[in-house]
Image (tube, coloured by chain):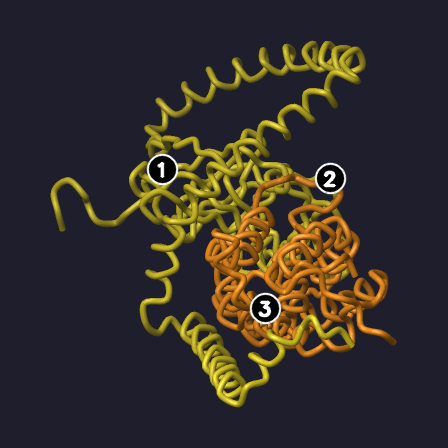
Amino acid sequence: MRRSNKPLASRMASPMGLLFNRFAFAFLLALGLTLLVAGRSGIGPVEQVRTGLLDVLAPVLDVISRPVSAINDLATEVEQLSRVYEENDRLRQENARLLHWQAAARALERDNAQYRRLLNVRARSDVTYITARVVGESGGPFVKTLLLAAGERDGVEPDQAVVSELGLVGRITEAGRNAARILLITDLNSRIPVMLEGSRRRAILSGDNSGRPLLAFLEAEAEVQPGDRVVTSGHGGMLPPGLVVGVVASVTENQVRLRPFVDLARLERVNVLRYRRPSLVNDRNGP
Amino acid sequence: MRPRRRKSASKRIGDGPGLPQLGFWRLGLAIPGLVSLVLVLLGSLPIGVPFLGPVLPAFGLIAVHVFALQRPDLMPHWLAFGLGLVTDLLSGGPLGLTALVFLGVQALSASQRRVLIGRPFVLGWAAFVAVALAAAGVSWLIACVYFLDFVNPVAALLQVAVTVTLFPLVAAPLLLLSHRMTGQAFA
């Protein structure tokens, strides 16, 4: 055995040192368990402390993540350069198809506006956006969250919906002054009221930490098949209705799974929606 | 076997009367903690690794294991616990889960010093596989109890696979650093 460890070993093995070590271990073990219990049951200021510390850590991550973000951008550009001709051809075809859809959408928009006027339909509440940078992700196997470099200072509040240009990402669960946490739609604790866009059948999008969340509580008589689009239903008033979420990926006897439109592993910037939820109380005149 | 001769007792940061000669010894004592903290922060960056999804390697686990094995005096219980707490804060997971796991890994790895120090790197790698699997198992159990649900263990196993694969890349510089601090040759 190497004798070079002697000073260290002798210090570690001294009776007082051993006693202190054991005491420290037992104390930290108890502290860890207490934190778990307190966090689970919401006892004490665990959440406030967590949010406060998040505010301290987020700016550090913001600085460190900038070079990583630059490298990611560079890698994406190089990847795109390698297939620029192929991509150009695909975009040309898509453009032709979209021009056709644009004409159809304009006609529908006109019709819709006319019907709304005729029926005196109330316009949807205003939705405004806050665009923010993603500076961190959970990376762990048991939670699916993202850290955002925007907080209450910028108007971000808990329960707001977070979207990217492709669709729903998740919702805000914690908001500090400078930072906020997004619970992704794939997280075990995420439950989003959704519906099938075509048949308007309702369901609850329930995350299970896999990349394909479940469509739970789908009505038994609902006809569903892979490829059906799923949007938020707006029930519960937390999220605006009609946000695109994804498409049905697989249908088995017991499970319907969804493939989100958004690649949740490669998000750099997202939009937080400031949505004024419908209320029975008249905000202007008071109750 | 004849014990290997130590180059110089005064080169070991944190030990003996030679410390003041280094001048920066107080800073040196904080190196393992700072390096581990940087690794924990790196493990939370949105790197966007293709095919892995949002599961990233547990760099913090590697740091706690290596330093607890090489310099347990510079990776005490409280530091491992604190690094775990920072990981929990960043991940948004149950506060205390990773802190408890890192505490356990620190105790386990430090207790295996006599067995693992001076052994070939491959043996150390194999030992880390066992440590990472045990850590994932304990984390998974705590997560199941915490969420009162059956948590899919596949992601935890995937993280073990990624972490174990990247172990040599991360552990080699950490080993060099701790050996440099100790003044020993590479084991």
Disc 2 from disc 3: Cα separation: 27 Å
In the image as oriented, which residue stretches furthest toward the right? B1
Chain that appears orange: B
Chain that appears yellow: A
Which numbered mark, 1 or 3, is in the foreground of this view?
A: 3
Within 10 Å of disc 3 (Cα), the crowding (few <14, some 14-19, many 20+) is many
Q: Are marks 2 and 1 in contact (CB under 8 Å)?
A: no
Splitting the image into 4 quarters, where does residue A199 fall? top right
- Indicate whether B103 appears above or below A247: below
Whether residue A214 is visible:
no
Mark 2 belongs to which amino acid?
Pro
Whether residue B106 is visible:
yes
Q: Chain of mark 3?
A: B
**Same chain shared by disc 2 and disc 3:** yes
- Tell me which residue sits at (65%, 61%) in the image: B182
Task: Classify the position of the C terminus of chain B by image quarter.
Answer: bottom right
Mark 3 belongs to which amino acid?
Phe
Q: Is residue A169 left or right of residue A257?
A: left
- Indicate whether B117 appears above or below A196: below
Mark number for residue A274? 1
Q: Is residue B124 left or right of residue A4?
A: right
- Tell me which residue sits at (45%, 49%) in the image: A181
Task: From the top left corner, tell me how far across and down residue A130 is, in percent.
Answer: 39, 32
- Tell me which residue sits at (72%, 9%) in the image: A92
Q: To which residue does mark 3 refer? A: B102
Q: Nearer the viewer, residue A126 or B135?
A: B135
Task: From the top left corner, tell me how far across and down residue A172 is, in percent.
Answer: 43, 48
Q: To which residue does mark 2 refer? A: B50
Which numbered mark, 2 or 1, is in the foreground of this view?
A: 2
Check disc 3 and report its element: helix, strand or loop.
helix
Mark 1 belongs to which amino acid?
Arg
